Image (cartoon, grey):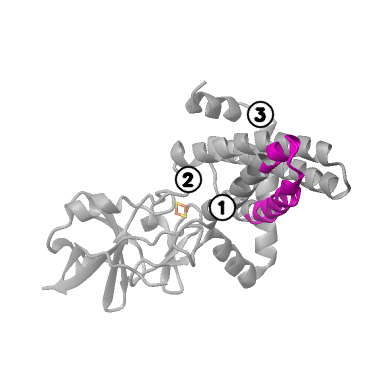
Amino acid sequence: MDSLAITKAIEDQEWLGPVADGLQKGVGAAYEAGGDAGRKVEDALHGVWLGHPLHAVLTDIPLGAWSVAAALDVMEAAGNEKVAAGADAAVGIGLLGALGSAVTGLTDWYRLDGKATKRVGGAHALINITATALYGVSYGLRKTGHRGAGRVFGFLGMGVVSAGAFLGGMLVYDQKIGVDHSDREKLEEDAGDFVDVLAWDDLPDGKPTRVEVNGHAVVLVRDSDNVHALADSCAHLGGPLSEGKLCDGGIVCPWHESRFALTDGRVLDGPSTFKQPHYETKVENRRILVKYGDTVMEG
Ligand code: FES
């Protein structure tokens, strides 16, 4: 069975729909209840500060630690009792990593829509929660002297977490979740000199307006005597920024509410962790000229 068939099989699981909806609503309500502080925590957990999804980094901790634990468990089962403490420590480290991994994963996922994404993401979450519970039991058994049973629960956990990791890979590689959707390379390839895109008088103040530059959609925003230009297709999942609204010096994507600075495209609010490609602008003879001018951002 290939990954597309697996996606389809999961997508067809009707019972997953309400489970995923309920989980997403619960996570969203928790962040909303936190107000501005909740938004800051959410952005930190997306990885806005890192410029990369934090979840992808944290998932390596439980997978790595539990792989080590499995190897040490095999050695212990073969009679080497000296490795027992190391195996227990690896299971414990994996549990801590799984907690961070779960929180960041749920934070990324709750803002996603689309049947397949919701259900595959929901299945990924449920499988990994099950694996973490198995390792939790394994840890408890080890610490109460039931080492053989602890190892069995550990091996069960390893099997389950491997299935969860496979679904996580499908979300990234098949459904392109957590990757930069801005097509930056193509923008650079097609970049040229300034292009005349619109008469200054035809650009309403404060209303995002879509134009084309070298075959790429660009959103223009006039702010009194200035004009800003960003790629129109959102770096998160391709939402049309020209249909978004303006808020505190940024433009808010209509799909999942990432907010990008008008001046340079940096991320002001997630879920996007990738900055939005930015264009230079100038006005000559009451015409607006635009040129792709992405710059490397700090912070
Ligand atoms: S497409 Fe998701 S925030 Fe823009």
Which amino acid, mark 2? Ile
Q: Whole-percent x and y of residue 171? A: 51, 40
- Asked whether 293 or 71 is in front, the reply is 71
Mark 3 is surrounded, within 10 Å at the Cα level, by few (under 14), some (14 to 19) or many (20 or more) other residues, namely few
Depth check, mark 3 against mark 2: the one in front is 2
Q: Secondary structure at mark 1?
A: helix
Mark 1 is surrounded, within 10 Å at the Cα level, by few (under 14), some (14 to 19) or many (20 or more) other residues, namely many
Most frequent secondary structure within the magenta stretch: helix
Distance of mark 3 from mark 1, alpha carbons?
A: 22 Å
* First reached walking from the N terminus: tag 2 or tag 1: 1
Label 3 sits on residue: 14
Label annotation for residue 108:
1
236 drawn magenta: no
Q: Which residue range is magenta in the image?
A: 72-100
- Asked whether 201 or 266 is in front, the reply is 266
74 drawn magenta: yes
- Asked whether 223 or 135 is in front, the reply is 135
Q: Secondary structure at mark 3?
A: loop
Q: Whole-percent x and y of residue 219? A: 31, 60
Asked whether disc 2 touches disc 1, contact meaning CB atoms under 8 Å apart, the reply is yes
